[in-house]
Amino acid sequence: MEKQHQIKRTLAQTDSIETICNLLGSSGHSTRSAFVGAVCGHFGFVDARGKAQTSGCIKALRELERGGHFVLPSARPRVSVEGRRPRRLGQPVEAPSGVPAQAEAVQELSLLQVETVDQMRLWNELMLSEHPQGAGPLVGAQMRYLIGSAHGWLGGLGFGAAALQLADRDRWMGWDATTRRQQLHRVVGMSRFLIRPSVACHNLASRVLGMVLRRLGGDFQTQYGYQPWLVESFVDSAHFAGTCYRAANWEAIGQTRGRGRQDRAHQKNKTVKAIYAYPLASDWRSRLGLPEPIGLPALTIAEGLEGNAWAAQEFAGAALGDERLSQRLVDSACTLAAMPGRAFSGAAQGDRAAVKGHYRLIDQAADSAVTLEAILAPHRQRTLQRMKAQATVLCIQDGSDLNYSGLAQCGGLGVIGSNQTGAQSRGLHLHSTLVVSTDGLPLGVLAAQCSAPIATAKNEPPGATPVPIEEKKTFAWIEGLRTCSQLAKELPTTRQICVMDREADFFELFDEQRQRARVDLLIRAQHDRCTGEALRLFESARQSPVQGRLNITVPRQSARAKKSKQKARAPRKQRCAAVALRYRRVDLPPPLAHKGKAPITLWVVHVRETAPPEDAKALEWFLLTTREITTVEQAQECLRWYCLRWRIEDWHRVLKSGCRVEALAHRSAERLQRAIAIHLVIAWRIMLMTLLGRECPGLPPDVLFSDLEIEVLEAYAKKKTASAQTTG
């Protein structure tokens, strides 16, 4: 069976219905099953083994009968379910004993394919008693296994038909509706996977997954006459991390939308689950007639960042107009990264040739090919590759002012602020897009622009011509969104969420997203807008029903003295805030300047602290998103994503305090921008190294450090340990 028969689609055709009516009238079929067999024979509905596909045929015929197209022969009385289907053992399955702590030590670990009635009863008993989803029923072509051992039964697995439609899976595979209908039988769904709760055995789940995937194709061939090429499964990420799937080399490819197989009314009453996929054939795409993914291969987060290689990976090949300049860029980045925060002459440690080469790179003419964008281009490509390896990425946008008021002779700087006396601060405004994973690990700098702000009048005179959005400072947010939208074709399996602070709460940005609709927005609301209802945005969210309660960690905040236009800020201790969660859909009408446009449909997620400390202001957020929010899990996910917006603030801190970019001293804004571009990537790597050390303490040191650096760190650690012991 090369292609799956479209039984329902075929029988619903006008000429097919006429044929069925002729078959009903031409000969007397004594039973319904006999008539179904005749229909299968006429239309050629047989599976890979040559057997008639009676189940799918009778289902389609019943639907057509209910539609009034014909009347089928009477069906024979049903045999009771208990009389024809094995159910349960009637007693609990004996708990395994003496199971070792490591999977390698499990004795006689094996998989038993369920074939007999007794085996089916045993499998049902395990699932009904110990699996959250019970025993089924499974649908389509099915395969069941028991996990056996010398210690007793350890669990079981069940496979059935794949999901009919999954937006993220179908986008990852790249097939259209026609191909999906024809080839869906080549994808099998792992509907049940149980390691018994009483079994605590490290690596057992991933080991069992490897065992079953090695034999699943052959077992399908034996039983059904064809082999599946891809396996899918679902993980309730609210309760499970999916660690065993990743350990067994499954790939996370997206999320469900909370709909079950029979959810024809779009009620979405199921929990949202992560989708995992595993290819049973390495060339499954070509077998399905699908194109290979576009562009360069995906990269893991830490791949290519070794101590001696990272600079070449992130900067090599930059189109600077001269290959020698491109190589100098790599060498300069490597030197600066070894001693971030120091001037290049200090980091080079007396290497006069290196110092001369670096400043020759920086001190190019204003019209040179050595620009911020050209320097960042190789790193941007590597960032794109790291994005490809993720099911969802957060593209966090934000701006930060870089103060160069001390460079009196530097040309091309703009006005970034002024104090009470009117004295202006000079510098550059940096607007960037930092991409992070949903675990908070930075993937790279996707875009950055350094501009020299121009001082403008605070208030426009009455009747003044409105300034076009392209000439406003806020246009940088739209440009960042366009950058992400343009990359959507190169990231067919990766969902991009643009996360922004309150400065991005303006109508033109939402209207831009509506026109492109390839990237979702998640923005903290600043304006209490009209909603077309009696209540404005904030109050309508506050009065919507509470959907859940959760705790949010409010980070520590240091004190800040009054500076220029910045207000003084008191210190704040870290605390855990208990908040009420609400969400609802809102339709925001356009402002007067855009009164001819349609309202914007968004979802607002609202959290408010219920019992704040007496000396603290209650935490309250209004988050606007273009992503549909219909479940508490989706709302909580948006909150987790927005909490990761602080990653770009941390990156700015590394850039200013760790790399000390505001201490750079060059004679023009163009030269400053070139130096800043190199430090943007160095700051990203420092931040990634710090977070990987915290999140993955078991990561091998040679992933990020050279042999010499590891040797120095080991010597330093021994010295610190000896000093501590002496002091103690």
Image: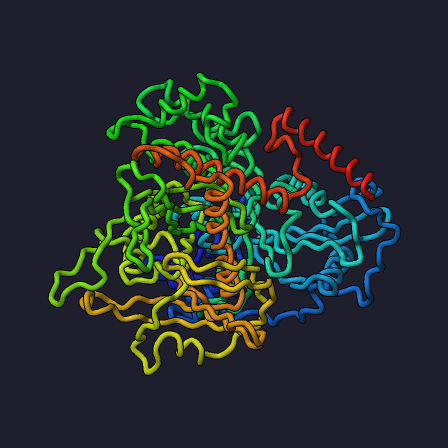
Task: Name the residue located 33 percent from the left edge and 67 percent from the top edge.
Answer: 601
Residue 84, placed above or below residue 489: below
Task: Name the residue located 58 percent from the left edge and 54 percent from the top edge.
Answer: 234
Q: Nearer the viewer, residue 715 or 488?
A: 715
Residue 531, placed above or below residue 383: below
Task: Name the residue located 27 percent from the left edge and 71 percent from the top edge.
Answer: 589
Q: Position of residue 129 (x, y in %)?
A: 74, 65
Whether residue 291 sits left or right of residue 338 in the image: it is left
Q: Position of residue 489 (x, y in %)?
A: 36, 43
Residue 437, placed above or below residue 721: below
Q: Position of residue 609 (x, y in %)?
A: 54, 73
Q: Nearer the viewer, residue 21 or 101?
A: 101
As drawn, which residue projects farthest toward the right?
98
Whether residue 460 sits left or right of residue 505 in the image: it is left
Tell me the quarter of the image containing the C terminus.
Answer: top right
Residue 631, placed above or below residue 431: below
Q: Is residue 589 visible?
A: yes
Q: Position of residue 681 (x, y in %)?
A: 45, 37
Counting the numbered discs, the total is 0
As drawn, which residue projects farthest toward the bottom?
534
